[in-house]
Image (cartoon, rainbow, N blue to C red):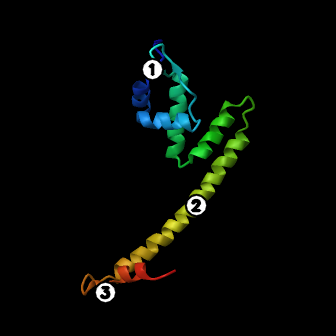
Amino acid sequence: MHTDDFRISELANKAGVNKETIRFYEKKGLLYDPVRTDGGYRKYSRQDLERLIFIKNAKGLGFALSEIKELLEIADGEIYKCSDVRKIAEDKLEYIDSQLKHLKQLKATLAMLVSECQRTGTIRNCPIIESLSKGA
Protein backbone atom coordinates (compact mmCIF):
# COMPACT_ATOMS: atom_id res chain seq x y z
CA MET A 1 0.00 0.00 0.00
CA HIS A 2 1.02 3.58 -0.63
CA THR A 3 2.20 5.52 2.46
CA ASP A 4 -0.93 7.72 2.33
CA ASP A 5 -3.18 4.65 2.21
CA PHE A 6 -4.83 3.36 5.35
CA ARG A 7 -6.62 0.22 6.35
CA ILE A 8 -9.90 0.70 8.16
CA SER A 9 -8.37 0.30 11.63
CA GLU A 10 -5.69 2.90 10.83
CA LEU A 11 -8.29 5.30 9.45
CA ALA A 12 -10.48 4.81 12.50
CA ASN A 13 -7.54 5.45 14.81
CA LYS A 14 -6.41 8.59 12.98
CA ALA A 15 -9.95 10.03 12.92
CA GLY A 16 -10.82 9.02 16.48
CA VAL A 17 -13.81 6.87 15.53
CA ASN A 18 -14.45 3.15 15.46
CA LYS A 19 -14.51 0.87 12.44
CA GLU A 20 -18.27 0.37 12.70
CA THR A 21 -18.76 4.13 12.37
CA ILE A 22 -16.78 4.13 9.14
CA ARG A 23 -18.82 1.23 7.74
CA PHE A 24 -22.04 2.99 8.78
CA TYR A 25 -21.00 6.22 7.02
CA GLU A 26 -20.19 4.20 3.91
CA LYS A 27 -23.67 2.63 3.95
CA LYS A 28 -25.25 6.07 4.39
CA GLY A 29 -23.28 7.44 1.45
CA LEU A 30 -21.26 9.92 3.49
CA LEU A 31 -18.00 8.16 2.68
CA TYR A 32 -17.18 6.81 -0.74
CA ASP A 33 -16.94 3.07 -1.23
CA PRO A 34 -13.30 2.28 -0.56
CA VAL A 35 -10.90 0.75 -3.00
CA ARG A 36 -10.14 -2.87 -2.15
CA THR A 37 -6.73 -4.50 -2.09
CA ASP A 38 -6.13 -7.80 -3.88
CA GLY A 39 -6.70 -9.41 -0.50
CA GLY A 40 -10.10 -7.74 -0.14
CA TYR A 41 -9.09 -5.23 2.52
CA ARG A 42 -10.54 -1.74 2.39
CA LYS A 43 -7.97 0.87 1.39
CA TYR A 44 -8.52 4.52 2.33
CA SER A 45 -6.74 7.68 1.21
CA ARG A 46 -5.78 10.94 2.88
CA GLN A 47 -8.94 12.45 1.28
CA ASP A 48 -11.04 9.77 2.99
CA LEU A 49 -9.46 10.76 6.30
CA GLU A 50 -10.20 14.44 5.65
CA ARG A 51 -13.81 13.59 4.75
CA LEU A 52 -14.19 11.50 7.90
CA ILE A 53 -12.81 14.33 10.02
CA PHE A 54 -15.25 16.72 8.29
CA ILE A 55 -18.14 14.41 9.24
CA LYS A 56 -16.91 14.07 12.82
CA ASN A 57 -16.51 17.85 13.22
CA ALA A 58 -19.93 18.53 11.70
CA LYS A 59 -21.51 16.00 14.07
CA GLY A 60 -19.71 17.76 16.92
CA LEU A 61 -21.48 20.96 15.92
CA GLY A 62 -24.82 19.19 16.10
CA PHE A 63 -25.47 18.62 12.42
CA ALA A 64 -27.61 15.59 11.60
CA LEU A 65 -26.31 13.04 9.12
CA SER A 66 -28.76 14.30 6.49
CA GLU A 67 -27.41 17.82 6.94
CA ILE A 68 -23.83 16.56 6.79
CA LYS A 69 -24.62 14.74 3.57
CA GLU A 70 -26.00 17.97 2.13
CA LEU A 71 -22.89 19.88 3.22
CA LEU A 72 -20.67 17.24 1.65
CA GLU A 73 -22.66 17.37 -1.58
CA ILE A 74 -22.17 21.14 -1.70
CA ALA A 75 -18.46 20.80 -0.92
CA ASP A 76 -18.09 18.09 -3.57
CA GLY A 77 -19.84 20.13 -6.24
CA GLU A 78 -18.11 22.04 -8.99
CA ILE A 79 -20.08 25.14 -8.01
CA TYR A 80 -19.42 25.87 -4.38
CA LYS A 81 -21.97 28.30 -2.96
CA CYS A 82 -21.06 29.57 0.45
CA SER A 83 -24.60 30.96 0.74
CA ASP A 84 -25.98 27.40 0.65
CA VAL A 85 -23.68 26.37 3.48
CA ARG A 86 -24.57 29.49 5.43
CA LYS A 87 -28.30 28.71 5.08
CA ILE A 88 -27.78 25.23 6.49
CA ALA A 89 -25.76 26.67 9.38
CA GLU A 90 -28.38 29.37 10.04
CA ASP A 91 -31.12 26.72 10.12
CA LYS A 92 -29.03 24.73 12.59
CA LEU A 93 -28.56 27.81 14.78
CA GLU A 94 -32.31 28.39 14.79
CA TYR A 95 -32.90 24.77 15.77
CA ILE A 96 -30.31 24.98 18.57
CA ASP A 97 -31.95 28.17 19.87
CA SER A 98 -35.33 26.44 20.03
CA GLN A 99 -33.74 23.44 21.77
CA LEU A 100 -32.07 25.75 24.30
CA LYS A 101 -35.38 27.45 25.02
CA HIS A 102 -37.01 24.05 25.50
CA LEU A 103 -34.18 22.85 27.76
CA LYS A 104 -34.45 26.02 29.89
CA GLN A 105 -38.16 25.33 30.34
CA LEU A 106 -37.42 21.73 31.31
CA LYS A 107 -34.75 22.87 33.75
CA ALA A 108 -37.10 25.39 35.39
CA THR A 109 -39.86 22.80 35.76
CA LEU A 110 -37.54 20.16 37.18
CA ALA A 111 -35.90 22.69 39.55
CA MET A 112 -39.36 23.67 40.83
CA LEU A 113 -40.26 20.01 41.45
CA VAL A 114 -36.96 19.38 43.23
CA SER A 115 -37.48 22.43 45.44
CA GLU A 116 -41.00 21.22 46.33
CA CYS A 117 -39.65 17.85 47.40
CA GLN A 118 -39.18 17.86 51.15
CA ARG A 119 -37.38 14.49 51.21
CA THR A 120 -39.74 13.39 53.92
CA GLY A 121 -43.05 11.64 53.85
CA THR A 122 -44.13 8.78 51.69
CA ILE A 123 -43.78 8.26 48.00
CA ARG A 124 -47.48 9.14 47.68
CA ASN A 125 -46.68 12.70 48.71
CA CYS A 126 -43.70 13.09 46.39
CA PRO A 127 -44.29 16.07 44.07
CA ILE A 128 -41.95 14.67 41.46
CA ILE A 129 -43.80 11.33 41.26
CA GLU A 130 -47.18 13.13 41.32
CA SER A 131 -46.13 15.41 38.46
CA LEU A 132 -44.86 12.52 36.35
CA SER A 133 -48.06 10.57 36.99
CA LYS A 134 -50.39 13.33 35.76
CA GLY A 135 -51.81 13.24 32.25
CA ALA A 136 -51.00 15.94 29.74
Q: Amino acid at mark 1?
A: Tyr
Among the 4 quarters of the image, the one containing residue 47: top right
Q: Marks 1 and 2: which is nearer the front?
A: 1
Q: Residue 10, position in %: x, y?
A: 40, 25
- Residue 124 is labelled as 3
Report which residue position mark 2 lands on.
97
Q: CA distance from mark 2 to mark 3?
A: 37 Å
Tell me, yes or no, if residue 54 can be seen here. no
Report which residue position mark 1 lands on.
41
Q: Amino acid at mark 2?
A: Asp
Q: With 132 as the anchor, is 54 left or right in this view?
A: right
Looking at the image, residue 102 lies above or below residue 60: below
Task: Please tell me whether mark 1 sits on a helix, a strand or a loop.
Answer: loop
- Residue 58 is labelled as none
Q: CA distance from mark 1 to mark 2?
A: 44 Å
Task: Please tell me whether mark 2 sits on a helix, a strand or a loop.
Answer: helix
Q: Which tag, 1 or 3, sits closer to the chain's start?
A: 1
Q: Which tag, 2 or 3, sits closer to the chain's start?
A: 2
Residue drawn at point x = 55 percent, y = 36 percent: 27
Near mark 2 (Cα within 10 A), the count class, few <14, some 14-19 or many ≥20, is few
Near mark 3 (Cα within 10 A), the count class, few <14, some 14-19 or many ≥20, is few
Q: With 10 as the anchor, is 28 left or right in this view?
A: right
Tell me, yes or no, if residue 18 can be seen here. yes
Task: Please tell me whether mark 3 sits on a helix, a strand or a loop.
Answer: helix
Residue drawn at point x = 53 percent, y = 63 percent: 100
Near mark 1 (Cα within 10 A), the count class, few <14, some 14-19 or many ≥20, is few
